[in-house]
Image (cartoon, coloured by chain):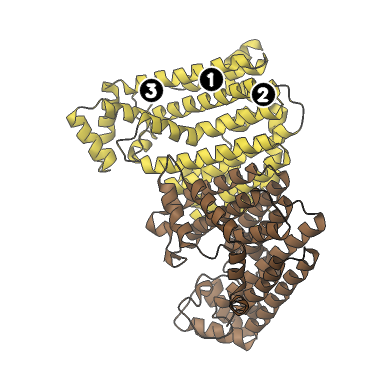
Chain colours: A yellow, B brown
């Protein structure tokens, strides 16, 4: 049995440890996404919610609350809140990116229309807002309001930074916080706030979520270029085609000679891409060690996440969160 | 001077009575829509905010707070909140309706793209959320969260009810509450809540805003068919072309004979519209007295709004709000 446990992935161990709470979150999501008047709403939402995903964000809220000894009912509301916000941003992102696939299924904007994706996203935001008001905690509301603003600002920033070779690492970090880390850190932070933890612990929960989210997104951005394996998979190069300035490219552009610079100008800034360009991009990333260097930066952020955990209660969940930070980077082949 | 005052429209008299407060709201809007990191945000928002409009919704909040004797700072935050929510819904509506004109200017989705409209709308929602958290009133947050859910649900309902000849007056009323009345009633209600009014007064403020909003939207829907003048203006028939089931059409469909029913089936349900159909629609609305009957229903709602005011403090602003309810229906030529 202990061998089995050791063999499972950390997020699977977290899911097992938070089994009952996750079931309560799933029930609350189903209940709150229902709309008596507008049946289109549960149709669109169910399509996404049933597709599932790892439910990492609500799990972070539940994990934080449990590790901090919370015994009230509101961690369930907050976990559902976080998942609703995440689902709402996915719906709006699919419109923005004109995506056709999400979690291995056709996207809502393809099955219904962009309009449904926009409006059902708005509905889920409003529902998440009602859920958090029910907790009666102004501090929780403040944290989630700020996260919502960071998320929206990061999305706009990503839009305006696309195709801009002058994008800095600092801007990239702001985009990553908006895209991923702001909701991760809010998820962990509110779990501690609802449990009545002191400022030091709440700050540690913020830092863990923020650093985990940054590490997670950097690894996603590496995987988009095939990780460090340099094998081209079927999803390799989406960011390249969408002309996104992610960290590997930012670093390769910074190290580029005149010929390489012309390549990035043509493919990313001007968007004139030809057969074979992705292969060239991969070879330039490799030549400047951009993939390895981003992996090291992701490892640094994972280390930051782990070290923040020392300010939090000694608890089996804390060890799983530590392992999760390692695992996030270990996903790279 | 008193003659001049009597000659002005009620919303202009309200604007004059709330001059200083409205200036503070405008300043707060400018300050809070700014984004240090993403300059696209103030560009898109300024485009809409500068176009102005009557700023009716924030004025309702300021009017309610002043009439109730509020002397704190938070009515400004709440008025800005209400305007941000309104602007955010306009941005998303323009994407949904594929509009090209708003407040006499090209829409943001035409000037930039749908993506900017979606994301900047999200940003304004998040900003409005931060503003309301600053008031520190959970009751205010509860009211606005519920309004946000009603708005989003109403928008989805409108989408799914379009082209559906079975749409009932009850469904129409839900759509109207989502489109207009929910934000009107939240605007007046939070003005009283922040002023610490008792439940009777807060209920009266809700009823005034709700009934005013319903009356306002019914009149808008009448004006879309040229009001009761039966003269075809340049914007006449937008709802007909978009196959929206507004109250005049719902009533004409309910009274239709077999031939008329076939006309509505073809033009609204199937969307096969030809030259001259709008003129036919107008003549059917006239034949069944649908325009006059909707005008009477709008007058009834205006009367409901006015009668709710009796539970509120005797104040010059109260008289202006009463006149405003009359004026909303008097807009019909």
Tell me which residue sits at (40%, 54%) in the image.
B113
SS type, badge 1:
helix
Residue located farthest toward the left when viewing the structure as drawn: A259
User: Looking at the rendered structure, which numbered label has been put on residue B158?
Assistant: none
Q: Are marks 3 and 2 in contact (CB under 8 Å)?
A: no
Disc 3, SS: helix
Residue A164, above or below A333: below
Residue B236 higher or lower than B35, as above or below: below
Q: Nearer the viewer, mark 2 or mark 1?
A: 1
Asked if A16 appears above or below B308 in the picture, the reply is above
- Residue B228: percent from the left, percent from the top? 59, 84
**Mark 1, mark 3: which one is toward the viewer?**
1
For mark 2, what is the residue?
Answer: A16
Above or below for A44 versus B14: above
Tell me where residue A163 appears, x and y as whole percent: 32, 40
- In this rendered view, identify the residue nearer to me: B329 or A278: B329
The answer to whether residue B219 is visible is: yes
Chain letter, disc 1 residue: A
Q: Are marks 2 and 1 on the same chain?
A: yes
Label for residue A294? 3
The image position of residue B168, as x and y in percent, is: 68, 70
- Residue holding disc 1: A305
Q: What is the crowding at mark 3: few (fewer than 14 residues within 10 Å), some, or many (at least 20)? A: many
The chain ID associated with circle 2 is: A
B112 left or right, relative to B174: left
Decide which of tag 2 and tag 1 comes sooner along the chain.
2
Marks 1 and 3 on same chain? yes
* Mark pair 3, 2: CA separation: 32 Å
């Amino acid at each position: 049995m202990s061998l089995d446990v050791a063999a499972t992935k950390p997020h699977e161990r977290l899911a097992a440890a938070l089994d009952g709470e996750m079931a309560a979150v799933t029930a609350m999501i189903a209940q709150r996404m229902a709309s008596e008047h507008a049946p289109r709403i549960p149709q669109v939402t169910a399509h996404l919610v049933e597709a599932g995903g790892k439910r990492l964000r609500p799990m972070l809220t539940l994990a934080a609350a449990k590790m901090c000894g919370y015994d009230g009912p509101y961690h369930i509301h907050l976990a559902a809140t976080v998942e609703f916000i995440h689902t709402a941003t996915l719906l709006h992102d699919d419109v923005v990116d004109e995506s056709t696939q999400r979690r291995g299924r056709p996207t809502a904007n393809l099955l219904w229309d962009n309009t449904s994706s926009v409006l059902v996203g708005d509905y889920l935001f409003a529902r998440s807002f009602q859920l958090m008001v029910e907790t009666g905690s102004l501090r929780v509301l403040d944290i989630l309001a700020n996260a919502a603003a960071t998320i929206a600002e990061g999305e706009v920033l990503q839009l305006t930074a696309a195709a801009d070779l002058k994008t800095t690492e600092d801007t990239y970090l702001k985009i990553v916080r908006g895209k991923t880390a702001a909701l991760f850190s809010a998820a962990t932070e509110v779990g501690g706030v609802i449990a009545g933890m002191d400022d030091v612990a709440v700050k540690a929960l913020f830092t863990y979520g923020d650093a985990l989210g940054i590490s997670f997104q950097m690894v996603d951005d590496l995987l988009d270029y095939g990780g460090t394996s340099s094998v081209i998979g079927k999803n390799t190069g989406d960011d390249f085609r969408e002309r996104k300035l992610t960290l590997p490219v930012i670093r390769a552009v910074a190290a580029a000679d005149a010929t390489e610079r012309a390549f990035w100008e043509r493919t990313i800034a001007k968007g004139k891409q030809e057969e074979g360009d992705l292969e060239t991009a991969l070879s330039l990333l490799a030549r400047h060690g951009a993939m390895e260097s981003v992996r090291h930066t992701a490892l640094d952020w994972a280390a930051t996440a782990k070290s923040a955990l020392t300010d939090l209660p000694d608890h089996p969940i804390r060890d799983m969160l530590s392992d999760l930070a390692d695992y996030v980077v270990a996903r790279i082949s």
